[in-house]
Image (tube, helix red, strand yellow):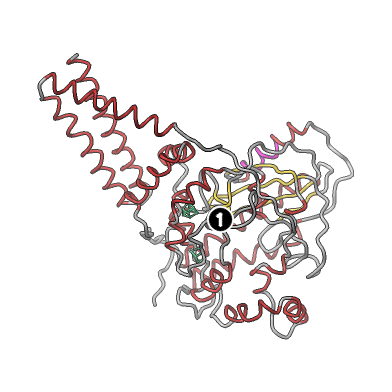
Amino acid sequence: MEQFADGILIGFGSFWLLGFFAFGFLSLREHVPRAAWISFGVGTLLALPLFLALLLPALTKAAIAFLILGLMLVFVILVLYSPESSQENPPQRQERYDERDVVFSRARLTPGEPKYDRYYAMRPENLATDEKFRAQPGLLSPDAPKAEPLTFAASESSFDLTEYVREAVDGPVSTQVTRASPDTITHMIKGFAFHLGAHSVGVAELDPTHLYSHVGRGTGAYGDPILLDHQYAIAFSVEMDYDMMGRAPEAPVVLESARKYVDAAVIAIQIANLCRRLGYPARAHIDGNYRVIVPLVARDAGLGEIGRIGILITPRLGPRVRLGVVTTNLPLMPSKGKGDSSIISFCEICKKCAENCPSKAIPFGNREGEPGGQRWKLDEIRCFTYWNVIGTDCGLCMAVCPFSHPDNWAHNLVRKFIRRSPFSRRMALWLEDLFYARKLIPRTHPIWLPRRDK
Ligand code: SF4
Ligand code: SF4
């Protein structure tokens, strides 16, 4: 019995010590010293009493060993017990959304031009709010408080590139059709996307409500109805750099956004081109030139769930991604599993993004809407006006989201727990607050980037 008790004490003591120290060293590599030091401290505090208990009389050691085993059993039951169903119905949107109403389309309207007059004749209720963001210095403005001239110029150089390739989203279709089974071709297309740098890839059947109703930006005539008869959509994500996003809301964030829009555009254009070379129509949907509501398509392609933040939360990188879509008639196999209700359950208790949002654009309350179509509604005008005040695209909500941690064994273990049960989610949130705090602790500024001098 004494040997058994010693084994339990040594086993659990070593487990806590090695586990937390491994996480501590990983946190140092991730440039999060707070998490590292807390991890070293917690590992020591949990392991040391167990090692010291080895000096106690045999009966006391046995009692402690059985107490530990009992607590572990209760813990396992609580982690495994999940009263909820793991899947929720995909949102049902009845009406198509007009891209002219998207704040980025409205921001491109200039007083005095016919488009401006047409839009505000159609939506007079939006004029006052839009004039407020137009009165601010503006995104990437040298007069904005977060302006850093070199970083802003580098960001513009990337945004320019997505403009240059605008026309490349579509093109001639090969008259020679290459045939293969949907399984084979889907496998190949996904592999190609990963090869080009995508982090996750999925396929959805294109639904009419995925499409905007009218052109608001990009190629095509402003206000034209959108007619796209493609059957499938390939959606993918690209990862945004953890350290750059950790500088939110400073200039490195907008530089990283711009770079990842380019990456997503380059991948989408190549995949669309591949589909057309195989003999099937295809269109890439890239920054500033969309025909589809990208987060909805990505959700239905199994890439994640729309969270409190109002954008897609992917299971392994959270919102720290940029998305791209290709629509096509190439016969494909749709991905299984849409959405992830555990992300919604976690968002219900977390609220970290809402607490950190400087413009108060993220709701604290419950999701709104009809059953089956409920979602959190981001106040995009508040958010966008704030961007125009500071000059960057902020990104604080992305940086603080617990799902945004790097894609590695430690964080993926926590993500697995989050999927398991309400108890696991509470525990994951408690640990998140302990190791990372409720407010963003800015990460180190990239040494190659100049700092703002005001
Ligand atoms: S910060 Fe929390 S509430 Fe906000 S999106 Fe991320 S998980 Fe959801
Ligand atoms: S980007 Fe900034 S302002 Fe916009 S919702 Fe996120 S935290 Fe709020």
- Compare residues 160 and 240 and report the one nearer the observer: 240
Residue 429: horizontal and vertical position, in percent? Answer: 39, 47
Q: Does the beta carbon at disc 1 come under 8 Å from ligand 1?
A: no
Say if the magenta span includes residue 293. no
Taking 183 as reference, is 42 above or below it? below
For this view, does 390 lie left or right of residue 442? right
Quadrant position of residue 248: bottom left
Quadrant position of residue 262: bottom right
**Quadrant of the rendering where the N terminus is positioned:** top left
Image point (60%, 49%), residue name: 237
- Is residue 38 something that shows in the picture? yes
Number of marks in the image?
1
Residue denoted by label 1: 367
- Helix, strand or loop for disc 1: loop
Residue closest to the far bottom: 112
Image point (72%, 53%), residue name: 210
Residue 60: horizontal and vertical position, in percent? Answer: 14, 23
Residue 258: horizontal and vertical position, in percent? Answer: 57, 62
For this view, does 9 lie left or right of residue 206? left
What segment carries the magenta color?
188-194
- Compare residues 160 and 96 and report the one nearer the observer: 96
Residue 342: horizontal and vertical position, in percent? Answer: 52, 43
Going by the numbered disc 1, the residue's amino acid type is: Arg
**Mark 1 Cα shell of 10 Å, populated few (<14), some (14-19), many (≥20):** some
Residue closest to the far top: 1
